[in-house]
């Protein structure tokens, strides 16, 4: 059974940083494309960043380019999202994704 468990969310001031982690079990992140999505209150879930199977290609939403970095550690079977220069509009529940599998999410709240 596939499990994706996110952690690292919390409350941070605007301009601050957080690092989200996604621990995977039941799959190997080394052979799967992985992604981070987010859903803000009253909005649809949107893609934040994704990383290719081999980790050589990354894509980002325009709103986070230059501020967020996705990476994966095959040895730890984990995926990360480094978030810098956080803005109020980054407040959302962040979800880890692998194709059709989803984690339960971790809440990121950015305050002024």
Image (cartoon, rainbow, N blue to C red):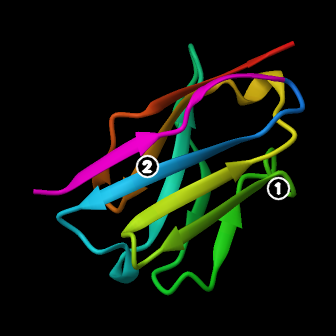
Residue depicted at x 52% and y 78%: 52
Residue 24's image quarter?
Answer: bottom left
Q: Secondary structure at mark 1?
A: loop
Report whether 107 appears left or right of 62. left
Residue depicted at x 33% and y 43%: 103
Does residue 50 lie above or below 21 as drawn?
below
Report whether 68 appears left or right of 9. right
The part of the chain drawn in magenta is: 1-13
Predominant secondary structure, magenta span: strand
What distance separates the C-alpha of mark 2 from that of mark 1?
18 Å
Query: Which quadrant is the C terminus positioned in?
Result: top right
What is the x, y in percent for residue 50?
57, 63
Report whether 19 appears left or right of 111. left
Question: What is the residue that sits farthest to the front in this orientation?
Answer: 76
Does residue 10 lie above or below 62 as drawn?
above
What is the x, y in percent for residue 17?
77, 39
On whether residue 63 falls in the magenta region, the answer is no
How many marks overall?
Answer: 2
Report whether 62 appears left or right of 39. right
Query: Which quadrant is the N terminus positioned in?
Result: bottom left
For disc 1, the marked residue is 65
Does residue 75 lie above or below 45 as drawn?
below
For disc 2, the marked residue is 96
Tag shown at residue 34 = none
Question: What is the residue that sits farthest to the left in this orientation?
Answer: 1
């Amino acid at each position: 059974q596939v499990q994706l468990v996110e952690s690292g969310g919390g409350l941070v001031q605007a301009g601050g940083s957080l690092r989200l982690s996604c621990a995977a079990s039941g799959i190997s992140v080394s052979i799967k494309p992985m992604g981070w999505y987010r859903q803000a209150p009253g909005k649809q879930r949107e893609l934040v960043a994704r990383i290719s199977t081999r980790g050589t290609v990354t894509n980002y939403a325009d709103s986070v380019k230059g501020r967020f970095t996705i990476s994966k550690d095959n040895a730890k079977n984990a995926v990360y999202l480094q978030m810098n220069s956080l803005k109020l509009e980054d407040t959302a529940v962040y979800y880890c994704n692998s194709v059709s599998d989803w984690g339960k999410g971790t809440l990121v709240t950015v305050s002024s």
